[in-house]
Image: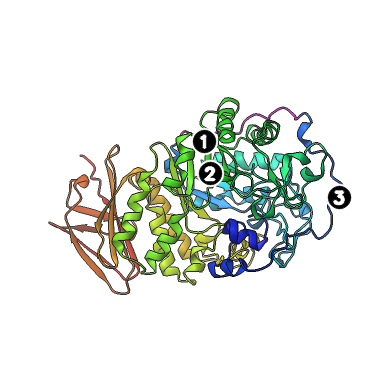
Amino acid sequence: MQAPQLLSLAIERMRHAPLTLLLALHLLSCTHTPAQPDAPPAPASPPAAVVAQPPASPPAPTVPPRSWADEILYFVVVDRFADGEPATNVAVDTAAQGAFHGGDLKGLRQQLDELSSLGVTALWITPVVKNIDSFVTGAGFPDWGYHGYWADDFHKLDPRFGTEEDLRALVDEAHRRGIRVLLDVVYNHPGYNSRYLTNPQTKAWLRSEDRGTCGQDDLTSCVSGLPDFKTELPEVAKYLLDAQLDWAKRSGVDGFRLDTVKHVDHPFWKEHRRRLREEVRKDFFLLGEVWGGDADVLDPWFAGDEMDAGFDFGFQGNSIAFVLGRGRTIAFDKYLKSRAKVRPGYLLAHFLSSHDVPGALHQLEGDVKRFRLAAVLQLTSSGIPTIYYGEEVARPGGDWPANRSDMPWGARDIKPGAGKPRDEDLRKLYQKLTSIRRAHPALSRGTHQGLSTDGDLYVFLRHDAESGDAVMVAINRGQQPAKVSLPWPAPWGATVAEDLLNGGRLEGPTLELAVEPLGARILGRIHTQKP
């Protein structure tokens, strides 16, 4: 997400410009030259930090109370989704992989029905603050801040994404559709050669490579060569918190997605939580990115109640390996069961693709049948499933920066992805899966029990004791039909079940379950109406 400075990426983490592991290892032996802007930025004026801000606007309409454990999250890189206001396009070049492509907040708002009809219930958008006006060339091509993570002024909205009114309108319209909104925020760093580095009022707030002040640990290193805010200093922490909390107050968003969490210390995050609850609202949701996170890695932040949820980075790799036939089925079942170790009251968010790693479909070499199995696993597993824009219509993705390509719109004249092909059958599968998940609390909140974990046929049961709901999921990753005979699940209290995914029913003294090659079934209890 941040600089394409490849050695730093290989050493620090793949998230900033995801490459294959072999390339990363090769880069460790290469000479590293920090990325430099193509031309010096205009003389910096003081950040808008210390100027009085207008009073907060009335909050946007709120979504009715609903547990975040039940949400289905959709992640959008704003610049790559939909261009709703061509007049705001600056230096747009859709043929250049590192340039702005013209997507904006207005365009996203205009296409919210695409999200609501898919069945998602929450939206995460990339940062919208003013980014640097220049580009860097460390990746071998001009690379701009189209992604929003290279801030130049935390108090201004980047005009290339629209206006503050556009942001509020997006949140309002999302709420009218029952969709919550998470805004991505960054506290760890500004952009390359940001005005914060040159402004006399703020230059002492930062560690930087050109001054030789970067450290070697998580808290003081300059991630991918980006300037590192000294967030341990009270005046720096206050400035950043004031800026980002002001966006929360004025936009009406429901929460933040927190970038580079491990690069900011725990006292900062505790104060962040305290102020949000006191100044914004008590239920303001925080989803944090700790690179390599899982239930154990994330627990220090959960133990201190510094955030509500974190990303489970293991889900993608484990799921891809399973559907490819790698490893024993029982080992994959053990992994899924282990996700329940998360501290009570906190959540894991799991993804198949993201802006920081090669997408699942790409890693599956375009095998849509196996990707469909991965999607079934994602939408039937505990936690917050996070769908990366376009993967539901088979956007190819790829290694960075191809994993940030334009949203495919097919025959619809929606730029920048007009004319790019879509797999509508895959989207229909996603619609079925989101509908099933939303109708069955066992899939979002239930326990996990492996029922058949031998060979290529994997069957597990999700059961929510509070609601009494139970759902059985069967995945056949093999090339041959698979069968298994199982006792009827006790929570159903019956010897008949409905196939929620494919239609039809099963009944008999035992559950005789057959699954086609590379197929899936999702079974639920048939509810009979009392006379």
Q: Is residue 421 visible?
A: no
Q: Earlier in the sequence, mark 3 or mark 2?
A: 3
CA–CA distance in space, label 3 to label 2: 34 Å
Quick check: 331 above or below 493? below
Q: Amino acid at mark 3?
A: Ala
Q: Is residue 501 visible?
A: yes
- Viewer-nearest residue: 87 or 227: 227
Quick check: 391 above or below 526? below
Q: Amino acid at mark 2?
A: Gly
Q: Which residues are magenta?
A: 53-65
Q: Farthest top residue?
A: 278
Q: Farthest left residue?
A: 509
Which disc, if any, is residue 83? none
Q: Which residue is mark 1?
A: 306
Label 1, secondary structure: give it: loop
Q: Which residue is mark 3?
A: 42
